[in-house]
């Protein structure tokens, strides 16, 4: 495993690259269970994993020690990886909204050079996914679990023009309407 590096925001977030996977530690919570002799503490970790090329997964893990909780969360995230279609490998195909519990997010496409304009947990998802240009807003809760799940709910709704064209039995240019519009304008002129 590569040694942890400090994230750009100055936070002490644990970012690792395992071979071709990007692992981002979003948060660690200390949870307590009250028993007869006192309290038993455990650690709960939330991890986002992606390949930087359109695949991402999230996982949670709980254990007595932090490293063990992170390991469990990482394994869970690897099992739950899913593919998200990206436009030009850098942004979304269209604007989407996602909801999970009290977490609501709005994700918008952005022109090249915009960067990732998103807060906290959503940024980790976009970085692991490989999105370079996106504007995102979280409305409602700031709970990292709900924000990440709402973000994944929104990303699951993203469809590529190619898949829409195949489903409708049309050409991609018919779906996008770009070439058809420019051709009709040329005929009129």
Image: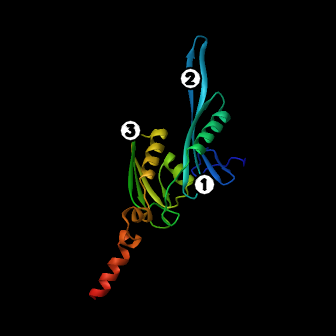
Q: How far is mark 2 from mark 1, CA to CA? A: 34 Å
Helix, strand or loop status at disc 3: loop
Residue 42 lies, in percent from the top left, at 61, 26
Q: Please, is residue 166 above or below residue 181 in the view?
A: above
Q: Earlier in the sequence, mark 2 or mark 1?
A: 2
Q: Earlier in the sequence, mark 1 or mark 3?
A: 1
Indicate which label's residue lies in the foreground, 1 or 3: 1
Residue for point 47% across, 52% down: 118
Q: Is residue 27 visible?
A: no
Helix, strand or loop status at disc 1: loop
Q: Which mark is residue 102?
A: 3
Answer left or right for 116 relative to 137. right
Q: How far is mark 1 from mark 3, CA to CA? A: 28 Å
Residue 133 lies, in percent from the top left, at 49, 61
Quarter of the rendering containing residue 35:
top right
Residue for point 39% across, 54% down: 96
Helix, strand or loop status at disc 2: strand
Q: Which mark is residue 32?
A: 2
Tag 3 near tag 2, CB within 8 Å: no
Quarter of the rendering containing residue 166:
bottom left
Tag 1 near tag 3, CB within 8 Å: no
Q: Which mark is residue 51?
A: 1
């Amino acid at each position: 495993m590569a040694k942890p590096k400090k994230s750009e925001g100055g936070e002490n977030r644990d970012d690792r690259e395992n071979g071709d996977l990007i692992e981002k530690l979003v948060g660690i919570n200390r949870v307590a269970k009250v028993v007869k002799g006192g309290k038993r503490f455990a650690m709960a970790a939330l991890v986002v994993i992606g390949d930087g090329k359109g695949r991402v997964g999230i996982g949670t893990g709980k254990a007595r020690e932090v490293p063990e909780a992170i390991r469990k969360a990482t394994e869970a995230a690897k099992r739950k990886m899913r593919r998200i279609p990206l436009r030009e490998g850098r942004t979304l195909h269209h604007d989407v909204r996602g909801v999970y519990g009290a977490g609501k997010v709005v994700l918008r496409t952005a022109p090249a050079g915009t960067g990732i304009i998103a807060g906290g947990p959503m940024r980790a998802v976009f970085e692991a996914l490989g999105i370079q240009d996106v504007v995102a807003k979280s409305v409602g809760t700031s709970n990292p679990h709900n924000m990440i799940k709402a973000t994944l709910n929104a990303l699951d709704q993203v469809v590529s023009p190619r898949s829409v064209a195949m489903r409708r039995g049309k050409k991609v240019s018919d779906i996008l309407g770009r070439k058809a519009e420019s051709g009709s304008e040329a005929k009129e002129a």
